[in-house]
Structures are given as C-alpha cells and as structure tokens.
Image (tube, rainbow, N blue to C red):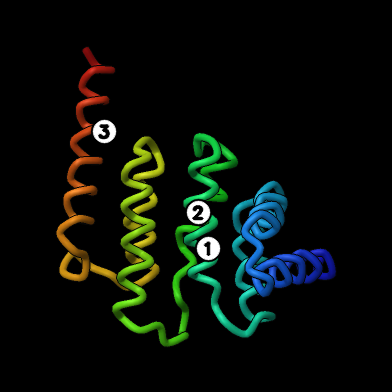
Amino acid sequence: RLAQVLAEASALASAAERGDVAAFLEELQASSRRGFNVARSELADAAVQVGAPFGPLALRSLVDFATAAPCQGERMATASLLSMAGPGAASTPAEVKAEIVQAAVVKLAEMGGDVIKLIPRVLSAWGLGQGDINQATSEALAEAVLREMRRGALALA
C-alpha cells in the first residue's frame, strides 16, 4: 500500500514538475478513484517530492477541469482537491497571488453550478479575504450568487 501511494505521488510530482496540466489531472483523478483521503495524501506527498507547492498548476488544472465537464460526484472530489492547493510556504508576491487567484475565481464564478462552492476554498487556500479581491472579482462573485439563487428559485417554482 505504501509503495503504491509513493508511486502515485511520484507520478503526480513528475507531472507537476513538467507543468503538464493534462497528466497532472489524469494522475489526480486516478488517485481520487481510490478515495478522497488517499488522493489528498498523495497530493501532499507529491508536493514534498517536488519540494515546492504547485498551487498555480492546481489553479490552472481546476479551471481546465471544471470547464471540460460538469463537476459532480467523483469529478467534484477531484475539483475539491485542486481547490485546496494553495501556495504553501512558498513566498508568492501578493500582487501575483491576487492576480492568478482572482482570474481563476472569476472563471469559476462564470461557470456557475456546484463549481462556485469551491471558490471559498480557493480563496482560503491562498489566504485571500474579502478585502484582498478587486471590484471585478467581487462583481463576478455577486453575479454568480444571484444567478444561482434565481436558478434555485425557478427550480422551486
């Protein structure tokens, strides 16, 4: 079991080092099929192997993944894992961090559906609060919430 976890973490680490979003997602989905906690452990082990967090890669992967197909069931578990990958202990300049996270958040907000539930996790993982986001991001979030509320109201009618 330990050998399998290390092998999977190594595959994730290799994809992360190459910046290969497709391979990274493929490996993470394979891990997710073995269970959320297994995948979370393999993701953490991969970060240790790489020697650096892969938050920016996880953000790109999350947006690509959520864009490809609806995030439900097993796909939502994978998306959830991606949403929790922040910058780690690495020092990412605040402006760069805010810029890449806000771009991802706006894209997720535009997608709507269950994906918007991941936005607070992304913001938390990257240490961004309400005061750290710009007007455009705030507006995109407000629009997404209102859209989802209307959708829910229509479903109830």
Badge 3 amino acid: Glu
User: With respect to residue 7, does 33 lie above or below?
Assistant: above
Badge 1 amino acid: Ala
Badge 2: few (under 14), some or many (20 or more) residues near its Cα, within 10 Å? many
Q: Which residue is mark 2?
A: 62
SS state under label 1: helix
Residue situated furthest top in the rendering:
157
Pick the quarter of the image with the C terminus. top left
How far is the residue under mark 1 from the one under mark 2? 6 Å
Q: Nearer the viewer, mark 2 or mark 3?
A: 2
Q: Which residue is mark 3?
A: 148
Q: Which residue is mark 1?
A: 58
Closer-to-camera residue (41/13): 13
Q: How many marks?
A: 3
How far is the residue under mark 2 from the one under mark 3? 20 Å
At horizontal 28% and vertical 17% (from top left) the residue drawn is 155
User: With respect to residue 140, does 157 lie above or below?
Assistant: above
Residue 3, horizontal then vertical, whole percent? 84, 69
Specify which label sits upstream in the sequence, 2 or 3.
Answer: 2
In the rendered structure, are the residues bearing label 1 and label 3 in contact, judged by CB atoms less than 8 Å apart? Answer: no
How far is the residue under mark 1 from the one under mark 3? 25 Å
At horizontal 45% and vertical 58% (from top left) the residue drawn is 83
